[in-house]
Amino acid sequence: MRFDIITVLPGLLESPFAHSILQRAQKKGLTEIVVHNLRDYATNKQKSVDDYPYGGGSGMVMSIEPFAACIEKLKSERDYDEVIFMSPDGELLNQSIANHLSSKENIIILCGHYKGIDQRIRDLFVTREISIGDYVLSGGELPAAVLVDSIVRLIPGVLSDETSALSDSFQGDLLDAPIYTRPADWKGHKVPEILLSGNPVKINEWRDDQALERTRNRRPDLLKD
Ligand code: SAH
């Protein structure tokens, strides 16, 4: 699966993809993440990628030409399943969107900055708009990294123990059960006895019960259906 991320601040995206699971997924050839500097597609002398808003008001608006040039170049090289714009007014990212997108081949992600991007980019090129939460960040880079991480860990072969993604919160509408590791007794605070029993059936039952209870307490909305 390939991601092409278009940004005016490529440096912001260097670290998130250079560690841990995302780094390994790329090394194993399970995903390719290519970051494009929008400024390379600026056509004017000043290499500017933004301009004043029509109608006045505060904040700069990202121009259509550099985005159009970059998207059109990418589209001439391969077919894309989605062109996603990270935006606070998009659909709220959740596990089911991540699951759905993890079966795609090629995705372009646009990162906005300043006041946002010219509406015509959204109307003409974007197929999907995704928000990572009801708050406003300075740019689409961190949201893009969040989206890519949520998708890549679901690609078969990326996690060493594939079932671990299946038992995560939100897969199957339940939150994850509490987890423990050694020592079994830390200053009198003990691990639940059942986890030391060596009885996998009983342990699974306990985990299911705990997951259900946690979901009931914290996120009853997930149990509605
Ligand atoms: N004026 C815009 C916000 C611009 S913030 C508005 O009120 O909707 C600048 C850029 O940051 C946005 O274009 C978007 O790409 C990104 N961004 C900010 N918050 C985001 C969020 N919650 N989810 C996804 N992208 C976000």
Image: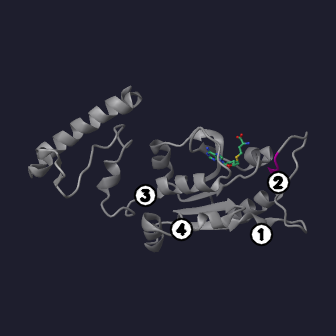
Q: Range of the magenta residues? A: 59-63
Dividing the picture into quarters, in which one does residue 28 lie? bottom left
User: Label 1 is placed on what type of residue?
Assistant: Asp
Assess whether residue 122 is covered by the magenta stretch. no
Mark before the other along the chain sequence, 3 or 2: 2
Image point (36%, 44%), residue name: 169
Q: Secondary structure at mark 1?
A: helix
Residue at which label 1 appears: 40
Number of the label disc, if any, that sits on residue 153: 3
Badge number at residue 63: 2
Q: Is residue 167 left or right of residue 116?
A: left
Q: Is residue 157 above or below residue 221?
A: below
Q: Are marks 4 and 2 in contact (CB under 8 Å)?
A: no
For the point 47% across and 64% down, the residue is: 22
Q: In terms of sequence position, does the residue under pointer 4 or pointer 1 come before the other?
A: 4
Looking at the figure, which quarter contains the C terminus? top left
Which residue is at the front of the view, 19 or 83?
19
Q: CA distance from mark 1 to mark 3?
A: 30 Å
**Which comes sooner in the sequence, label 3 or label 4?**
4
Dot 1 alpha-carbon crowd within 10 angstroms: few under 14, some 14 to 19, many 20 or more = some
Cα gap from disc 3 to disc 2, whole angstroms: 33 Å
According to the image, label 4 marks what residue?
A: 32
Q: Are marks 4 and 1 in contact (CB under 8 Å)?
A: no
